[in-house]
């Protein structure tokens, strides 16, 4: 197989495996919540695992093939009634899916992945050693992916339909631009007639009597013709200008649409980050991500990536309790962290939630009084909503407060500033010992507008170019004051 063909297959596999892993995880989440047994969802999960195994074999990724075969075997035994779909089984499947994700990430980064000891141990305990030989699943140093010897620029995948629409819009602009050549030809004709009129006027000055009348008739006819030509030029140019504006706007819309990508293309790696943080903190986490197939402007997603990482880190590191503490409070030892994306009109809504210790609003109020953000009477009647807005202010938190309040001040100002730049909004809700939820609303795409920047009294203002009729230069002496304004 040539390097070029293998490279294309690997690119296709990278996208395909993400889709399979995300769908299997989504099915596991649904089955865990509903408690349902074998059914259509389990069949789809089985087919997904089988397809992933075949795709890995096609690009000679034997470790991934072995992992996928293991998941396929588990689903097969659950379907046949030989294994229960309980928490232990679901946990084992998730560990193997995580191992697949880690191995793929390491392969494309030309790194050697760590041996998935937990996944291997869990599989052996569930299926026995024959189901997944360790020799086949051990992490071998990945070879260099074909065609990746030189760093490549970031690629943007655009659908064939989008490209066709962009080309059609470009063609329309070309046609409209061609029509403007008519204006040039008309102007040339007008110029010729004006020159003829000038010459005739000179001859008129040297004539008398009937000859003069004859010349005046000639001039009159040409003047009428000239007016008609000018009127036609104005109409043609007006239509052409309008057509170009419409074609340009349509092209702009198509380009913006081409910038729309699935959220998962930009927000990759969150699951691994959460898992690694939990391991470092000695915590157990059930992380769910929903709506990663939602399409949004790549620029919006890239701007929100770091703030979302802040929120997820806070949720794991500061929000979730240790397993022993959770048990003492009557909770499951594994904490829940959820990332959800959804489209609502022109808005992208993102939720980051955990079921951890939550925020003690009384402590927040006391701290706000100490830092003189609130007076004592205000602190006694302030609502949690008002207090939550204080957490987004830069410098509101201290090290002591980070510890006392589950670290919610850490990174929240970064979140607020980013969302503000996107002209969006952010809200935080929390209940002590129940959990915290952060809701972000941002435009699903970034719009650009041509504006005129003006400055007055030290302030800058942006006036939309579409609202301008013209520009004139005014001297200081021409400015008048009326009623103090």
Image (cartoon, rainbow, N blue to C red):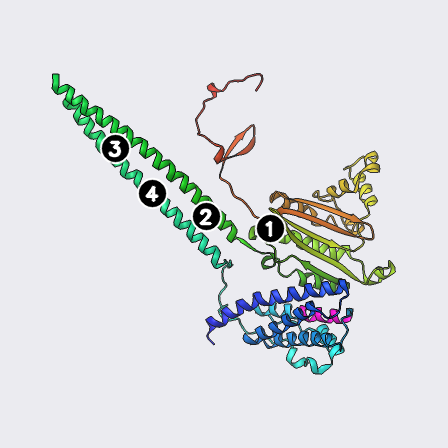
Instruction: Tell me the residue at 49%/62% (across/down).
Output: 152
* Mark closer to the chain start, 3 or 4: 4
Judge whether residue 95 is colored magenta: yes
Rendered position, 159 above or below 411: below
Rendered position, 192 above or below 130: above
Q: What residue is pinned by disc 3?
A: 190
Instruction: Answer yes or no: is residue 407 visible.
Output: no
Rendered position, 361 above or below 162: above
Q: What residue is pinned by disc 2?
A: 251
Q: Nearer the viewer, mark 1 or mark 2?
A: 2
* Structural distance between the alpha carbons of marks 3 and 2: 34 Å
Q: Secondary structure at mark 1?
A: helix
Q: Secondary structure at mark 3?
A: helix
Q: What residue is pinned by disc 1?
A: 303
Judge whether residue 74 is colored magenta: no
* Mark closer to the chain start, 1 or 4: 4
Q: Any mark on residue 179, and which?
A: 4
Outermost residue, bottom side:
130
* Structural distance between the alpha carbons of marks 4 and 2: 18 Å
Q: Nearer the viewer, mark 1 or mark 4?
A: 4
The segment highlighted magenta reads: 88-98
161 vs 125, left or right, is left
């Amino acid at each position: 197989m040539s390097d070029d063909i293998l490279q294309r297959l690997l690119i296709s596999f990278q996208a395909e495996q993400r889709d399979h892993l995300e769908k299997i995880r989504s099915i596991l989440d649904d089955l865990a919540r509903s408690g349902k047994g074998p059914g259509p969802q389990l069949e789809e999960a089985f087919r997904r695992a089988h397809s992933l195994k075949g795709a890995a074999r096609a690009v000679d990724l034997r470790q991934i093939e072995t992992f996928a075969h293991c998941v396929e075997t588990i689903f097969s035994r659950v379907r046949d009634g030989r294994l229960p779909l309980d928490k232990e089984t679901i946990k084992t499947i998730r560990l193997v899916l995580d191992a697949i994700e880690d191995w793929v990430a390491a392969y494309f980064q030309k790194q050697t992945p760590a041996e998935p000891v937990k996944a291997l141990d869990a599989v052996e305990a569930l299926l026995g050693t024959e189901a997944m030989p360790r020799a086949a699943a051990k992490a071998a140093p990945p070879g260099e992916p074909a065609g990746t010897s030189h760093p490549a620029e970031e690629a943007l995948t655009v659908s064939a339909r989008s490209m066709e629409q962009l080309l059609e819009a470009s063609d329309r602009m070309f046609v409209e631009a061609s029509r403007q050549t008519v204006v040039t030809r008309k102007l040339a004709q007008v110029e010729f007639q004006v020159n003829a009129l000038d010459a005739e006027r000179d001859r008129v000055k040297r004539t008398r009597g009937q000859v003069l009348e004859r010349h005046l008739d000639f001039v009159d006819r040409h003047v009428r013709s000239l007016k008609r030509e000018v009127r036609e030029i104005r109409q043609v140019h007006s239509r052409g200008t309008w057509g170009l504006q419409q074609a340009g706007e349509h092209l702009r819309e198509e380009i913006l649409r081409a910038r729309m990508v699935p959220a998962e293309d930009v927000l990759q790696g969150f699951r691994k980050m959460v898992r690694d943080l939990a391991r470092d903190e000695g915590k157990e986490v059930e992380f769910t991500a929903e709506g990663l197939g939602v399409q949004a402007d790549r620029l919006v997603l890239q701007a929100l990536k770091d703030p979302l990482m802040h929120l997820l880190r806070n949720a794991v590191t500061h929000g979730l309790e240790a397993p022993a503490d959770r048990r003492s409070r009557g909770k499951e030892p594994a904490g829940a962290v959820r990332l959800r994306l959804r489209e609502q009109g022109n808005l992208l809504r993102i939720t980051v939630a955990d079921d951890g210790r939550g925020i003690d609003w009384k402590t927040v109020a006391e701290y706000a009084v100490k830092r003189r953000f609130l007076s004592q009477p205000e602190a006694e009647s302030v609502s949690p909503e008002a207090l939550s807005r204080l957490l987004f202010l830069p410098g509101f938190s201290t090290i002591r407060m980070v510890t006392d309040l589950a670290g919610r001040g850490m990174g929240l100002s970064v979140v607020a500033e980013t969302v503000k730049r996107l002209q969006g909004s952010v809200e935080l809700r929390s209940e002590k010992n129940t959990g915290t939820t952060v809701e972000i609303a941002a435009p699903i795409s970034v719009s650009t507008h041509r504006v005129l920047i003006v400055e007055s009294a030290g302030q800058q203002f942006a006036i939309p170019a579409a609202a301008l009729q013209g520009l004139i230069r005014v001297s200081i002496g021409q400015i008048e004051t009326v009623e103090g304004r």
